[in-house]
Image (cartoon, rainbow, N blue to C red):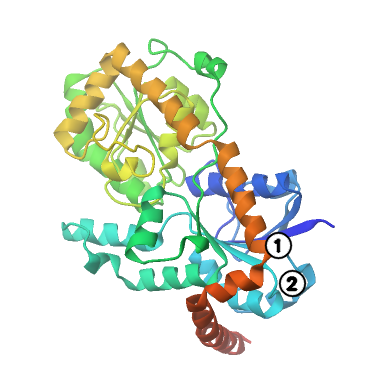
Amino acid sequence: MNKKLLIIGFVWPEPKSSAAGSRMMQLIAFFQSEGYSVSFASACAKSDNAFDLSTIGVDRITIKLNHSSFDDFALQLNPDVVLFDRFMTEEQFGWRITEQCPEAIKILDTEDLHFLRRARLQAFKDEKAVSNDYIFNDTTKREIASIYRCDLSLIISKAEMQLLEQMFKIDSSLLLYLPFLIDPISEEQQQTCSTFEERQHFISIGNFLHEPNYNALLYLKETIWKGIRQRLPKAQLHNYGAYASQKVDQLHNENEGFLIKGFAQDVGDVMQQSKVLLAPIRFGAGLKGKLFDAMQNGTPYVTTTIGAEGVVEDAEQDFVCDVAEEFIDYAVELYQSESLWTTQQKMGFQILNTQFSKTNFEVQFNDRLHVVCKDLESHRQKNFIGQVLQHHTLQSTKFMSKWIEAKNS
């Protein structure tokens, strides 16, 4: 009999707009390859950039928040596995799944740790280092509780795995390191990438609604690009991203070579035209999809410690720069030196092929699913904190939702 997966999406996936969208498509492809029929449900409105899931055989269902119609839907579908897209959807629908489908394996895809992203944002605004005072915020309590309530949580970065296991002492049986699932880049593919001489200009890319990306864009405009442009007066910076608002568009300046290009229909195409990616990310969490897009297309980059987290194991690499002057110096050198550029391009291919092999991680994911599925009752018994949180949250969230439903009727 066909196994059934229900994904409850925080948003409808937009693989051309965000790394989170690409990640979701990778997970769907994995489950389909394992013989699952996939249903994707979301209470979010669809945007024009949303991928048409029906083209890959995924059922699309629009659901309502705080509405008992979801109970009927879940009971009828009776999924074997439920995947929550970010902890907020687990908070909303987890208790309903527990009531209607108690035997379903519950998986949380964190995307990145939202509490870590929030802590770094607040510390950045306060111009302070990230301390425990920032880490132990209300979002932390909610997200950690969600991890405990699920049978397995997918963690996208080694740094975040370390944080959860060492600082919060979460048992490794509840966590699985599952980064982006990347197909290996063959020698032949590497040879087909545009050469140093065939490329020109700098590129930045990222969904402008994502605060770390918008902040990086402003940092480029106000600080980084001025320094680069002084030394490379003919160079341009092409800034791509979905959802460019008026405050983004007004940064466009032809005379400065700072160009807002908007949505990129084909990331591979714009990456292969560009010589260097600039990614001065100053806060955030998870893995940065732009770096993976760059490495897959043979485009060297300059980034920060936050940007390289989970990707570059040696933070002392020259292309990891947290000081503006060093960032500018290295970007100019990388743009001008073919030997340096080629060396970093090869390093990018090596990183993808050795650290993010799709095949290896899919095998690990499948093995863990089998272990959890084989003895789900024992797995849950060992997670006593999860049982406690399940008991209390089931009641509090349940009755809050029912109160909202009654209020709305």
* Label 2 neighbour load within 10 Å: few <14, some 14-19, many 20+: few
Quadrant of the image occupied by residue 4: bottom right
Label 1–label 2 contact, CB within 8 A: yes
Is 405 placed above or below 107 here? below
Mark closer to the chain start, 1 or 2: 1
Query: In the rendered view of the protein, which quadrant contains the C terminus?
Result: bottom right
Name the amino acid, label 2. Answer: Phe
Of badges 1 and 2, nearer the viewer stands: 2
Mark number for residue 61?
1
What secondary structure is found at the residue carrying circle 2?
A: helix
Side of 173 where 158 appears, left or right: left
Q: In this rendered view, identify the residue nearer to me: 92 or 131.
A: 131
Residue 309 locus on image (x, y percent): 34, 44
Mark number for residue 159?
none
Q: In this rendered view, identify the residue nearer to me: 41 or 154.
A: 154
Is 217 placed above or below 3 here? above
Q: Is residue 93 visible?
A: no
Label 2, on which residue?
73
Residue 123 locus on image (x, y percent): 22, 60
Q: In this rendered view, identify the residue nearer to me: 350 or 65.
A: 350
Quadrant of the image occupied by residue 68: bottom right
The residue at 51%/63% (across/down) is: 174
The residue at 65%/49% (across/down) is: 28
